Image: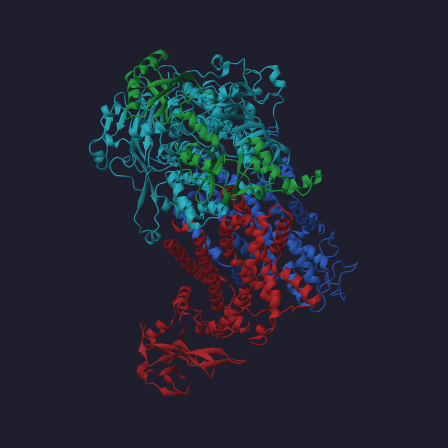
Amino acid sequence: MAVIEQPATLTAPARPSVWGRIAAVLALLGRSRVAIAGLILVGFWVVLAIFADDCIIRPACWVGGGSDGTVVSTPWLARYSPFEQFRGRNLEGPSADHWLGTDRNGRDLWARIVQGSRIILVLAPISVLIALAIGGTLGLIAGYFGGQIDELLMRVLDALMAFPQILLYLIIIAALGPSAVNVVLAITIAGAPGIARLVRSLTLDIKTRDYVAAAQTRGESPWYIMFVEILPNARGPIIIDAMLRVGYAVFAIGTLGFLGLGLPPPSPDWGSIVNTGRKFIQAGHPWDALWASLSIASLVVGLNLLADGLSEELGRYR
Amino acid sequence: MLVKDYMTRHPIMVEPGRRVVDAQRLMAESKVGHLPVVADGKRLLGMVSRAALSLRPEQLEGLSFWDLTDYMARLTVGRVMTPLSDIHTISPSSTLEEAADLMIAGHVTALPVVEDGGVVVGIITQTDLLVELRNLLGAIEPGWRVVVRMPDIQGEFGKVMQVITARGWGVMAMGCVRSPRRAELWDVVLKVRYCERDELVAELKKIPGQEIIDIRETTSYTQ
Amino acid sequence: MELPKGKHNEPVVRVQNLAIAYETHGGDVNAVRDVSFEIHRGETLGLVGESGCGKSTVAYGLVNYLGRNGKIVHGEIIFQGESLVGRSPEELRRLRGDQIAMVYQDPMTSLNPVLRVGQQMTEVLTVHRGISEDAARARCVEMLHRVYMPDPEAVMGRYPHQISGGQQQRVVIAMALLNNPALLVMDEPTTALDVTVEAAVLDLIADLRRDFDTAILFISHNLGVVARVSSRVGVMYAGEMVEQAPVREIFAHPRHPYTQGLMRCVPRLGADKAGSVLYPIRGRVPAPNHLPPGCVFEPRCDYATEHCRQERPALRQISNRHMVSCLRAEHIRASEWRPTEDIIPLLPAADAAEPETILNVDGLRTYYRQSGGSPLDLIGLGKKRYVRAVDGVSFTIPQGKTLGVVGESGCGKSTLIKTLIGLEPMTGGEAQFLGFDLEKKASQRDMGLIRELQMVFQNPDATMNPSYSVGTQIERPLRRFKVVPTNQVHAEVVRLLRAVKLDEHYYDRRPRQLSGGEKQRVGIARAFAGRPDLVLCDEPVSALDVSVQAAVLNLLLEIQREQGTTMIFIAHDLSVVRFFSDYVAVMYLGQIVEIGPAEAIYAPPYHPYTESLLAAVPIPDPSVAQQHIRLEGSVPSPLNPPSGCRFHTRCPRRQLLPDGGAICEREVPPMQDAGDGHQIHCHIPLETLHDLEPVVTIAA
Amino acid sequence: MITFLLRRAFYLILTLFAVSIGIFAMSEIAPGNIAINSLGNTITPAQEASFNAQNGLDQPAVTRYIRWMIGSDWRAAGLIGYPVRQIYEADLNRWSWWGALPDGTLFQNYTDDGENMIRVERLADGSTRDVPLGPEVWKTDAEGFPVFWGVDREGRAAMWVRGDDNEAWTLGKSTWRSSKGAPRAYIPLQKGLLRGDPGVSFFTRRPVAETLVPRLMNTLLLAGIAFVVVMPLALALGMLAGLNEGRFLDRLLSISSLVATATPEFASGVFLILIFSTWLKWLPGAVVVTSDTAIFERPQMLVLPIITLTLIELGYVLRITRASMVEVMRTNYIRTATLKGLPQWRIVTKHALRNALMAPITVIILHVNWLIGGIVVVETLFGFPGLGRYVMEAALFKDVFAIEAATMVLVVIAVGTQLVADLIYTYINPRIRYT
């Protein structure tokens, strides 16, 4: 199939600023309807998470509190505190007062869902970032040095990958107890081998390029070559993969919550909301389960759409 | 001197479903007089010639303009072609004489060349045979074309050749045929190069019993 | 001499004013504009031009395979009297593979990896002719015989990856010919092949054209290849046909300035840097959506006038069968052309004194461990097998000189220089450079040694790190080797950029904004930044278009002359090596078979391998007479090299020895000194080799 | 090719081994406490120590790993001097361990006072009789203590010390019972995983294999149906989307498959229950198993779990297949096939299909891990009595042997499918077959 080589755009600014680059990425995204849809979905949750209440300007929130039911923040988008129990108003459907209804304890569902987005949008990226750091480094080492190191590392990672992830989660959480840290730990351990594999294959490819040989002939250290010469050129696929992995992480956090292995109650984690809410579905009160399910589905779908659109656009200009 | 050396390879062909008008245009534009009709994979089904494509009044239902247009629009090559059962074909490894023989016997001016159970590989026409004749008689080589008439005696032809080779001249082409209307004599056409006309005539005249019927200088007409 | 047919001269295919465009985000891009040509039975039209000139687009346009975004804008393709434009997909399908066939550039990827060769071949027949599988097989085997495939029956049962590249291309050609097509389109069919294999495939193509009377459209960027197979040649530039003429005519009397420029870019075989000069064409091919308003070649043309800037010339007949699209074709003479001042490279001065030896390599060996497939290997007990990539190579280079290394792919020439520079571990032997031992890998070497030994790489797209700007990448060696004080680094980068004929605006450019030639220049600037004494060049120009290739070669020569750098220069193009090098080494299967001064290598006495390489080189001049010597078979595996002389399995000259060269199988050939440092490793006596006829005779 | 498969099999076994160690280690470092989990958090330290000793939990991890992996009966037999044997007691519906005298008589031992050992011999009809043993049975061990090794009444190898008045605590029906004259040390008898015995569950006090197998069967049924439904459908739809790249059908399939893969099972399960069970009332929203054959009597119970389980896989496989098909259709050999004039269907079936299947098959099989995750969620959501829920419960309870057994089963499935994938892959990719 004949493809016309795009002429190098000589009019492009020689050294784009950070904002210029962000604008370029956004422009790229703008071309793909899929990516825009994803951006809207993800953006919706990010905005909600940030502006749920006045936490961003009230440091008291950051050091904790609130989870015990004391109100330390003023609701903005959330309307009520996620922990405030309205007596006599439990298991209500949506109304003007409680937009999404209330749960068994008479807590406002909208407030809890919004608060849940905050939890998930903090935990998921953090766990992916840690997994990226660990998996990325292992992948670089395995790919660059090759030989025995590669063989050994990949065997271990293969074994980890052969292990069903859900079991990993179960065992880790069952062993260490449900907490935010352990959830992050579990997701990191489960995710790192996949990232290592990806980075390794990218490294194997990139290390055959002449510029790597050029660096070697300059006598550069392996670490310089790995992190300065190789890693920046692997960023495209890594970023896309990371975006998908944030989606998986949200997915996994939700699943853990659903299985009762997530954050301990009364934390409004979406999975736990579904878990407690599903008992009331047959009783004619599907709202808890429905809203929380919709939320998590829309967020993961949004992240996937974003990654999909981005990879398609990047692929088109590769 | 085999068909495969003189035929036209990759002839223009038509499929039986084509309209007759298209085939006519194709023949006119590409200046060919015959089209092999082939199925998928160049398998021969029949032949059409310009004559076969011309309108035959007895097949028409009426003579109004619309009838004619309608008829022509519907008429396909497959309906007017000479079917495979009625035509002669020849293989690429046959001799030209065989091709000529088939054409004479079949009153046709072209033969499809087929191999491997009916796959058309070329077409050989009267023109191709004439090209062979021309080349055989050396028309494209410069030199003296001389016709010598000699009696039907063993060794007569050798005498001519002896004379020519003795002088170091070259014979570029030759043909032998019984003289027209005089079956006891032979006419030999020779194309001789590297010599002067007078010398050639003088040398040939020395041979007893033979006579020079014609001598002329010829060059090629077509390239 | 061919006998004239005298009748029926309608071409098999006639293309008239063909224009092809691709739809892109930024609107339609006209890749091909107003191209016209015709091809008759038994004729080969060669299409040449640099990359991006629309050659392949024409080829795929001809078979109406332009992808989803390509379309024929206007023009006609008349095939066998009927137009191909606007035919239904089904009609086109029936023509493809039956009446029109194609041969592709890369045979490996053009064959389906999961189907046997036989399956892929027979289906052409079973689909188009509807004949039985057995009949089809028989015909396929016969056709493989026709393309001189050894053991066709066995090949039918193999998978594509199990046969060599040359054999794959033979399969593709045989497959194309199965249905005796009227038109054969060949898109760079030999580009991916080694020179010896290429020669054999080109011979095959010439044979087949005669036997099948097929009309061939032959596309290549290589003038030499086109000269060898074509009966007529069309030159394409920026999507237009700029000149078209019979092959002898166009090489003897090129009329278009672009054609003339192309011929000045390539070194003639036998030319060297002392006696001849390459003249690159300035500028670069314009992008199809940024064409100049007038003549497309005007911005790069030395003869351009105001008229050329305004009017776009059409292809017109200027003599019998010679067509050119230049407004001034009648006024320009190739012989009267004078280079403009700034592209005359200064010739190296004659040697004043005998220079000292800078690099001394003795018995160098580089083996790779090959992991076997037996269960024992699984636990590390398998028999250790080694690929002997470089196996006992010795040579020396005097200061300031260039050693060229030639050989087929897999002969170990790349491994040799990678070992020298420390990218591959040395298995044995010795290499002394400026008193340093080159035994260690690059990462363990002394900084002083690293600085004096640098490398220029082959692939322009991989030579620069796409993540960093040009300036950053040239700065790195400057800072690392502390060539200049830190505050002068920027100035030094600019100086280096100027030295490689790039201005300082390039400092902030990203690699993707550069053309291949520019990237290669940056690569050269980076290699020369530390002012090294020895630079190893691994095919630095083979991925470049000829006009750029000339410019880069000139640049290397100029820097070498200025800095007195010593070089090792690898290339598969024997003309380029001859032009560029003072000494040449010919390698076969990890060993040097012949080494000596460049002029001595290219004249008898030859090593038989050198002789066959020279016989295979495509020469861009149809008037040059070349001996017909072809190697049989393929290069044996370096895992298990032949005994005695490694070349004995393919040597065409063994018969010159008593009892057919039995000694070649038993004994390692002796080194014979032909004087002046010219060494030949062969059992055949020097005198016999000396009496061999020269492979290439250039008509006076 | 055989080498290739051998190598793969070798690595898979290695993987299994590593995994078994991994799980064991993981449950080892876990801070939870089996004794508290199974006995409640009101136990005294003495009771806990006794429980641990009886169950071998006081031993170092390595010892326990070895016992679990290759069994403890051979070691116990060496100490006792007689072989030990496991039999099924039909009247009590349980498996128990006995020592075997040379004449084949099965026995267990106990003592009430730490002085007189009593041998309980099992008769052919299942009844027992006590045979007192003389003082000569006490042997002096390495440290100089007179000890006796035998099989205790609970079916454990046990070591009594003469004159010892050890106290053991066991939890009876509802109360703690203390018994005097108890053994000092125990070796819980088991054949070891390698001989097919995954041990006894702390939770149910039944052999793990006994409870595991029916759960496994249920899950295999669920997953099997899901697999059979999803694979052909997903592959076919993926091919269809790939062949129509960029067209409406492709967009529709791509987007819906993306939504399907991105929605967690518990969310899509909730949607499905709401729509089909609560709203339309077509299908039951939960699986209620009242008997072994309940699933077959009301197969409609399985519909929603299967759909929930398949949605993710369907979308995922569809996307992979589509991407692979798109890539293959752009290759040079498809171009060759097109320019050979082959009809479109032939290009797709003969040239594209096999190449396009290579990527999905390996990826699909690797995705079995995800399927297992889905099973856990789906079984929890619908109350389906399968292996997933079994693992869940075991993990929450810290029932080590149950977790380990179930995990090994799941890993064997995951790893085994990889081997199958390798086989399929080598079959469709000739390049591997010959290297």
Q: Is residue A93 above or below residue B93?
A: below
Left or right side of C364 for C120 = right
Left or right side of A172 for C437 = left
- From the viewer's side, name the closer residue of A132 and C524: C524
* Chain identifier matching the cyan colour in the rendered picture: C
Chain B tint in image: green
* Chain identifier matching the red colour in the rendered picture: D
Residue C505 place in picture, x, y as percent: 57, 24
Residue D42 place in picture, x, y as percent: 55, 73
Residue at left offset 38%, top offset 14%: C349
Left or right side of A247 for B193 = left
- From the viewer's side, name the closer residue of D215 and A45: D215
Chain A tint in image: blue
Residue at left offset 63%, top offset 49%: D251
Asked where in the image residue C634 lies, by quadrant, the reply is: top left
- Which of the image's four quarters has the C terminus of chain C? top left
Q: Is residue D1 above or below residue C57?
A: below
- From the viewer's side, name the closer residue of D244 and C389: D244
- Which of the image's four quarters has the N terminus of chain C? top left
Residue D128 place in picture, x, y as percent: 40, 87
